[in-house]
Image: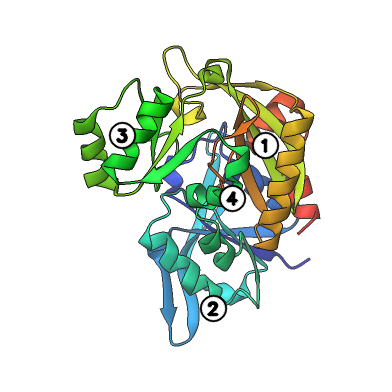
């Protein structure tokens, strides 16, 4: 049987953590389904004479191997030849990322791309939460010091999140308004997200997986001692969890809204029943961790329902 081509737009292969990486986990499942994997980074993508091409590395993924990523060859691929293309490079949601969505949109009617390039532009992770504010803790998005000071006066302990940040990078908890620190953040990032601190984060958050408009599972991520960050990359540990009926209803609503935007795969996060505003669509993670905890392989569901 002739192999199908799976193209993956990802971050550097050198960054992949085989134990937890969702792109690797999806790639292994794709290989079971007769896909050849062609992997490239955003910088390798080009529009040439009406064609969308990428300088790719043809790779083979394998667990339980001394060489889990085997590089077969390098080649330039006309992406229209791919049966499926996964956009899986890490945030930030910056101009380079936006540029790739415009380039890939040129072929999005001819091949299946997950997540949809236009949909990704319309769901800019933290900013999309403006549509979901009724489910969230007190939240402000601003760079106006007067508004920020008023928000601190009302909410006391406040978490600062750069709009374009990811993996908990530069997320800070302030116990009171610190003008100098806030000004430094504004100079670096411009608009920022501010949220009332939820102390129950010490008991972990809940990451909910959404695939094809359906709520398919969840894990809890417990920050390491002394941290407020539930990101696995920041040392958090994972455990099995059940979501509450309230969290399920919110998740179903978000899933429905994301499906309208042609977002196929997403992860959303809760703390104490509150949606915390990070609508993870650029490179959702956690499927391998979910499998390790439950033995439920959501990569199978992912491919079954494309």
Which of pointers 2 and 4 lies earlier in the amino acid sequence? Answer: 4
Q: Residue at x 61, y 42 (%)?
A: 134
Mark 4 vs 1: CB contact within 8 A: no
183 versus 261 height, above or below: above
Question: Residue 208, labelled with which disc?
Answer: 1
Q: Secondary structure at mark 1?
A: strand
- Pick the residue in front: 257 or 175: 175
Q: CA distance from mark 1 to mark 2?
A: 31 Å
Mark 3 vs 2: CB contact within 8 A: no
**Label 4: few (<14), some (14–19) or many (≥20) C-alpha neighbours in 10 Å:** some
Q: Secondary structure at mark 3?
A: helix
Which of pointers 3 and 2 lies earlier in the amino acid sequence? Answer: 2
For discs 1 and 3, the disc positioned in front in the rendered view: 3
Question: Residue 149, labelled with which disc?
Answer: 3
For discs 1 and 2, the disc positioned in front in the rendered view: 1
Q: Quadrant of residue 153?
A: top left
Residue 21: percent from the left, percent from the top? 56, 38
Pick the quarter of the image with the N terminus: bottom right
- Pick the residue in front: 126 or 267: 126
Q: CA distance from mark 3 to mark 2?
A: 44 Å
Q: CA distance from mark 3 to mark 4?
A: 53 Å
Determine which residue is flagged by label 4: 60
Residue 123: percent from the left, percent from the top? 55, 57
Which of pointers 1 and 2 lies earlier in the amino acid sequence? Answer: 2
Determine which residue is flagged by label 2: 106
Q: Residue at x 75, y 45 (%)?
A: 252
């Amino acid at each position: 049987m002739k192999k199908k081509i799976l193209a993956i737009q990802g971050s550097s292969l050198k960054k992949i953590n085989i134990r937890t990486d969702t792109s690797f986990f999806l790639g292994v499942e794709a290989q079971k389904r007769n896909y050849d994997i062609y992997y490239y980074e955003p910088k390798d993508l080009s529009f040439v004479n009406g064609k969308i091409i990428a300088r790719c590395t043809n790779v083979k993924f394998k667990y339980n191997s001394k060489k889990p990523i085997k590089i077969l060859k390098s080649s330039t691929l006309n992406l229209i030849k791919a049966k499926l293309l996964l956009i899986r490079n890490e945030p930030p949601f910056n101009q380079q990322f936006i540029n790739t969505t415009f380039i890939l949109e040129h072929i999005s009617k001819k091949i299946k791309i997950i997540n949809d390039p236009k949909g990704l532009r319309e769901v800019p992770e933290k900013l999309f939460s403006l549509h979901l504010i009724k489910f969230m803790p007190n939240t402000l998005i601003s760079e106006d010091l007067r508004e920020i000071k008023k928000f601190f006066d009302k909410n006391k302990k406040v978490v600062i999140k750069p709009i374009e940040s990811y993996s908990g990078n530069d997320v800070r908890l302030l116990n009171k308004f610190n003008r100098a620190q806030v000004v430094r953040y504004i100079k670096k990032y411009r608009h920022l997200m501010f949220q009332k601190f939820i102390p129950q984060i010490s008991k972990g958050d809940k990451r909910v997986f959404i695939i094809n408009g359906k709520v398919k599972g969840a894990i809890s991520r417990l920050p390491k001692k002394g941290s407020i960050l539930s990101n696995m990359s920041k040392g958090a540990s994972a455990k099995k969890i059940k979501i509450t009926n309230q969290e399920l209803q919110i998740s179903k609503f978000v899933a429905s809204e994301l499906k309208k935007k042609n977002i196929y795969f997403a992860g959303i996060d809760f703390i104490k029943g509150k949606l915390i505003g990070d609508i993870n669509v650029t490179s959702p993670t956690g499927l391998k961790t979910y499998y390790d905890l439950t033995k439920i392989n959501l990569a199978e569901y992912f491919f079954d329902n494309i």
